[in-house]
Amino acid sequence: MFNYAISRQDLTVYDLNVAFNPNNFVNVDGIARFESIKADVRAYTVRYDIWVLPFLNVYGIGGRINPTTYVKLRLPLELDFTVRSEGWTAGYGLVAAGGFGPIVFSGDFTQAWTWIGETSKANTSIVANARLGHMFRFKHKPTSNVVVLVGAGYLKINEQSDGNVNLLNLAGITTEDKQRASEQLDGLYNDLPAYEQEVFGGLYNGLASFLNDDEAGTLY
């Protein structure tokens, strides 16, 4: 089968560590403020499956994923930008189904890995569902029936990821945007107490260098 899916995700970022030098990460939870982060994800997948037993189906999936993320950053800079990415996904799954008299059950398990260009390794997701129901047969149509099912689902996505990105490609800001952001950054940094300036000095220098240089920097 061929599947097309679209979803909207509201994201929360915490324990955020960034650096312009991959050997000198700084936690910026204390100064970074996001008003919102929303991701629209479109996925195109192909699935091939086979019943290996009368009650057990196994399948493999693969496809393309295109996420578009809308970010509203309010501190240390006031920026709205859109990040477009693309990548591949692959995985496998199992489906078990059967019944005893009018009682029917089904369950499925899927594990998939998704590779996006900006991340250093694949993101893993696990989805599992289980359902139990009752079959109601039509007396005058024995080959037809209605099944009422209830069930529950489980979803796990690895919360931690790392990678690097070209800042200019990420934000797509103009020269005027960079100048305005540089002034905001200078004002914020100068208002920090001395001990916070020491903690965030490396990050400030890297970001200020990016904003005052025509060449884009790499953010880790």
Image (cartoon, rainbow, N blue to C red):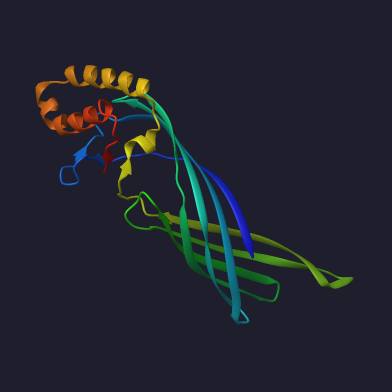
Q: Is residue 110 left or right of residue 146?
A: left
* Residue 7 image position (x, y, % from top left): 55, 46
Q: Quadrant of the C terminus?
A: top left
* Residue 26 image position (x, y, % from top left): 19, 38
Q: Is residue 87 left or right of residue 160?
A: right
Query: Residue at the location (45% across, 46% down)?
Result: 85
Q: Is residue 167 left or right of residue 86?
A: left
Task: Report the residue that reaches farthest toward the right.
Answer: 140
Q: Is residue 67 above or below residue 51?
A: above
Q: Is residue 13 above or below residue 115?
A: above
Q: Which quarter of the picture shows residue 204?
A: top left
Task: Report the residue that reaches farthest toward the front.
Answer: 214
Query: Residue at the location (25% across, 22% down)?
Result: 185
Of residues 199 and 109, the one drawn nearer to the viewer in this rendering:
199
* Residue 74 image position (x, y, % from top left): 35, 25
* Residue 48 image position (x, y, % from top left): 59, 71
Q: Which quarter of the picture shows residue 82?
A: top left
Number of on-image labels: 0
Question: Is residue 3 at all visible to an observer of this figure?
Answer: yes
Q: Quadrant of the N terminus?
A: bottom right
Query: Residue at the location (39% across, 28% down)?
Result: 173
Query: Residue at the location (35% across, 23% down)?
Result: 175
Question: Is residue 16 at all visible to an observer of this figure?
Answer: no
Task: Report the residue that reaches farthest toward the bottom.
Answer: 53
Of residues 119 and 193, the one drawn nearer to the viewer in this rendering:
119
Q: Is residue 6 left or right of residue 164?
A: right
